[in-house]
Image (tube, grey):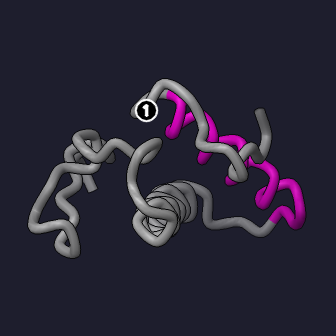
């Protein structure tokens, strides 16, 4: 997984890059799909680097990392997904 998360291509939107999707004007189903895909990729990266179990602290770190990635790619976190701002 050397590619950037923003360069990820979304098959359900015809191969559009993740960074090119405007999640603030898309439908709710599209926003949910983008969020789930981002969560999956972020968790895969996290657990490939940290293979020890730490408990609920890991869940909080994942939420915070998710919010930070949303801010980096889109400039803000969509309403309803403010995890660990």
Residue 67, quarter of picture: top right
Q: Which residues are magenta?
A: 54-71
Residue 48 in sight in this render: no
Tell which of 42 and 73 is nearer to you.
73
Secondary structure mainly formed by the magenta segment? helix
Q: Secondary structure at mark 1?
A: helix
Residue 7 in sight in this render: yes
59 inside magenta stretch: yes
Task: Name the residue: 47% across, 71% down.
Answer: 29
Relative height, residue 29 to residue 67 (above, below)? below
Question: Percent position (x, y) of residue 7?
Answer: 20, 45
Question: Percent position (x, y) of residue 6?
Answer: 29, 42
73 inside magenta stretch: no
Q: Quadrant of the C terminus?
A: top right
Tell which of 69 and 21 is nearer to you.
21
Question: Percent position (x, y) of residue 41?
Answer: 43, 62
Tell which of 50 and 24 is nearer to you.
24
Q: Residue furthest left?
A: 14
Task: Name the residue: 39% across, 54% down.
Answer: 26
Dot 1: few (<14), some (14–19), or many (≥20) neighbours within 10 Å?
some
Answer with left or right where residue 53 lies relative to residue 33. right
Return the residue at label 1: 74
Q: Quadrant of the N terminus?
A: bottom left
Task: Name the residue: 62% across, 66% down.
Answer: 51
Answer with left or right where residue 68 lies relative to residue 61. left
Tell which of 63 and 55 is nearer to you.
63
Task: Name the residue: 86% across, 54% down.
Answer: 57
Question: Percent position (x, y) of residue 62?
Answer: 68, 53
Residue 8, quarter of picture: bottom left
């Amino acid at each position: 997984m050397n590619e950037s998360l923003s360069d990820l291509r979304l098959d359900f939107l015809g191969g559009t890059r993740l960074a090119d999707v405007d999640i603030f004007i898309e439908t709710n189903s599209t926003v949910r799909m983008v969020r789930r895909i981002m969560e999956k990729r972020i968790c895969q990266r996290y657990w490939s680097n940290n293979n020890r179990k730490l408990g609920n602290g890991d869940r909080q770190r994942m939420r915070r990392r998710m919010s930070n990635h949303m801010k980096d790619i889109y400039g803000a976190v969509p309403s309803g997904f403010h995890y660990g701002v």
